[in-house]
Amino acid sequence: MEKCTRKAKEPLILNWKIDLTSDKKTKIYMKTYEPYEIKKLSDLEYSFTTDNHNLYRIVFKFSDRFFEEHCSECRDILEVDIVCVEENLPKDYRIGVTVFEIFDEILSQSCNGIMYRCDDSDGRQCKRELQFDKRYEDFNEDDNIDRFAQSFCDENACDKYYVLVDKGCLNYEEIHDSFNYRCRECNNE
């Protein structure tokens, strides 16, 4: 599996320091992106529409294909599906900001872990992995969220899976252990 490396591109937040006077006063310009308006369709389903009229659905669900049925702690991990029917999407930083705003709501309202798969069905796994890493870094400025990752390979391809979990949750250790040691596909069982 190839290692994904980030190319130098415009970051989500830009810090430009400009010296305005000789006495070293500095002004900082920040370019930030606001999330789109989020519609909560149910406790585990959200949607939003972009400026280009692309509809996204964010659905969280327990997936028994990953965890043993008798693993009650594993039910604290929700798999997320991020769905948009459009294929040619323009670059839009607000999408990532909006998705992580939804993640923040799920993580703050419950002690569930969120499991994300960097899908490679269209050959864009590396791009998704880099975007996820960048959004996570921006999102986790206060360092309250942990991220675990592992790869799963079958006869067709390798996919990278991430789990996000709030460090303050009582079941933090159970989520960590469930993902790292009880995930069937991740452990090639």
Image (cartoon, rainbow, N blue to C red):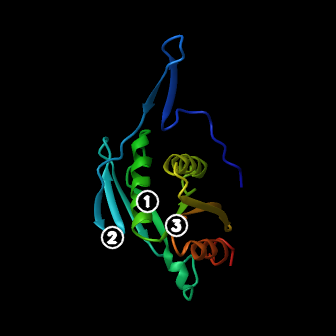
Asked if one can make out residue 118 in the rendered structure from this viewpoint, the answer is no
Spatial separation of the CA atoms under disc 1 and disc 3 = 15 Å
Q: Which of 10 and 152 is in front in this view?
A: 10
The residue labelled by disc 3 is 168
Quadrant in which the N terminus is drawn: bottom right
Residue at the farthest bottom position: 70
* Label number found at residue 183: none
Q: Residues within 10 Å of mark 1 (few under 14, many from 20)?
A: many
User: Helix or strand or loop: what does disc 1 sit on?
Assistant: helix
Q: Position of residue 186 (x, y in %)?
A: 65, 71
Residue 43, label in figure:
2
The image shows residue 186, relative to residue 40, as above or below, that is below
Element class at badge 3: loop
Q: Which residue is drawn at 50% across and 12% down?
A: 21
Q: Which of marks 1 and 3 is in front?
A: 3
Q: Which amino acid does label 2 sit on?
A: Asp
Give the secondary structure at mark 2.
loop
The x, y position of residue 126, in whole percent, is 61, 49
Q: Are marks 1 and 3 in contact (CB under 8 Å)?
A: no
Seen at 44% across and 31% down, the residue is 30
Q: What residue type is labelled 1?
A: Phe
Q: Which of marks 2 and 3 precedes in the sequence?
A: 2
Name the residue carrying label 1. 103
Q: Residue at x 63, y 41 (%)?
A: 6
